[in-house]
Amino acid sequence: MKKPELLVTPQTVDHVKALLETGADAFVIGEQQFGLRLAGEFSVSEVEEATKLIHAAGKKVYVAVNALFHNEKLEALGNYLEEMQRIGVDRLIYGDPAVIIVRREQGVTIPLHWNPETTATNWFTANYWGKRGATRAVLARELSLDEVLEIKENVEMEIEVQVHGMTCMFQSKRPLLGHYFLYQEKVMEIENRKENRNMFLHDDERNNKYPIYEDANGTHIFSPNDMCMIDELGELFEAGIDALKIEGVLQTPEYVVTVTQAYRQAIDTYFDESEDAYEDIKDDLLAKIEDIQPAIRPLDTGFIFKETVY
């Protein structure tokens, strides 16, 4: 078995530096007009700066171009992909097939990771995109462990699975929810609306707070819990899952650094020592994360072991 790649989502170039020190293997960066729900905004010049740092450490850079593209964005997308080719990033993360066409027309040769968010749910579709240039499928977060393992057994490409962080529940291209709930005075109210990345929909009936923000791609609502698989990684390791992602959107940089350190230790202990050694420390690693977990965001295992309903 080979070690899975530990994939992180930094917020700034300085955050990249800190995460390199924790042992992260790969980094998802980009800017919001081309990529969905990025932890941080990286201009082209910042992508170039980050890429130099990451490559100097022998690690990889993945640039997100997984937005839903409307006609008026296609010309800018072509120019952006040319810039990414010039910089020399390692992969492009896409969901819209328009990226494949624009990439071909621009003569860009950067390999592709297929990430359609909620619709990567079977190996037939994954292999379809694999035959069209994708080297990795980023699986939907709504899959059970059995479904993940079955897909891994049947695909002809790498598989990436999220193991920590928030899950997006809803997206609209419009700044929809803020207007609706603010003016209609419905069940949920907007809290901290003035802070673009620090707003919550407060559901009194279920005592939940759903993180929400609006950006160039519209309105995004996230789960009230954070996924955490730090003590349940064994079967993913055994199955040969290629990449484990820590989703850092709407988290503090310090939180992401601490979580990345914990997952780095879990991976290295399992592969460099033994499965028993990982079993011995996994509860302590979970406790370390629980110590820094915001009180309003309980940890769970997402859909991996149950049909979670938010």
Image (tube, helix red, strand yellow):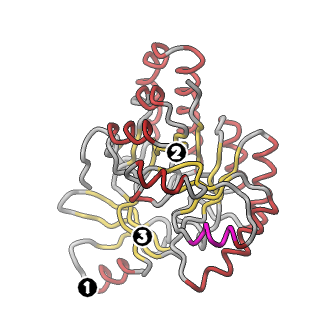
Magenta region, residue range = 98-104
Q: Mark 3 points at which residue?
A: 192
Q: How far apart are marks 3 and 2 (CA)?
A: 26 Å
Whichever of callouts 2 and 1 sits on the residue coming sooner in the sequence is 1
Tell me: 50 left or right of 246: right
Label 1 crowd bin: few (<14), some (14–19), many (20+), radius 10 Å: few
Residue 300 visible here: no
Q: Name the residue under label 2.
A: 246
Residue 172: where, in percent of width, then height?
40, 75
Mark 3 and mark 1 lie on one chain; the one further toward the N terminus is: 1
Q: Which mark is residue 72?
A: none
Which amino acid type corresponds to the residue marked 2 in the rendered image?
Answer: Ile
Question: For the residue marked with disc 3, what is the amino acid?
Answer: Asn
Instruction: Compute the Cα span from label 2 to label 1.
Output: 36 Å
Type of amino acid under label 1 = Gln
Looking at the rendered structure, which numbered label has been put on residue 184? 1
| Image coordinates for residue 59, horizontal then vertical, percent | 72, 41
Mark 3 secondary-structure assignment: loop
Foreground mark, 3 or 2, reads 2
Circle 2: element type: strand
Prevalent SS, magenta region: helix
Viewer-proximal residue among 48 and 190? 48
Closer to us: mark 3 or mark 1? 1
| Residue shown at 65% from the left, 44% from the top | 26
Badge 3 density bin: few <14, some 14–19, many ≥20, Cα 10 Å: few
| Residue at 79% over, 65% down | 45
Q: Is mark 1 on a helix, strand or loop?
A: helix
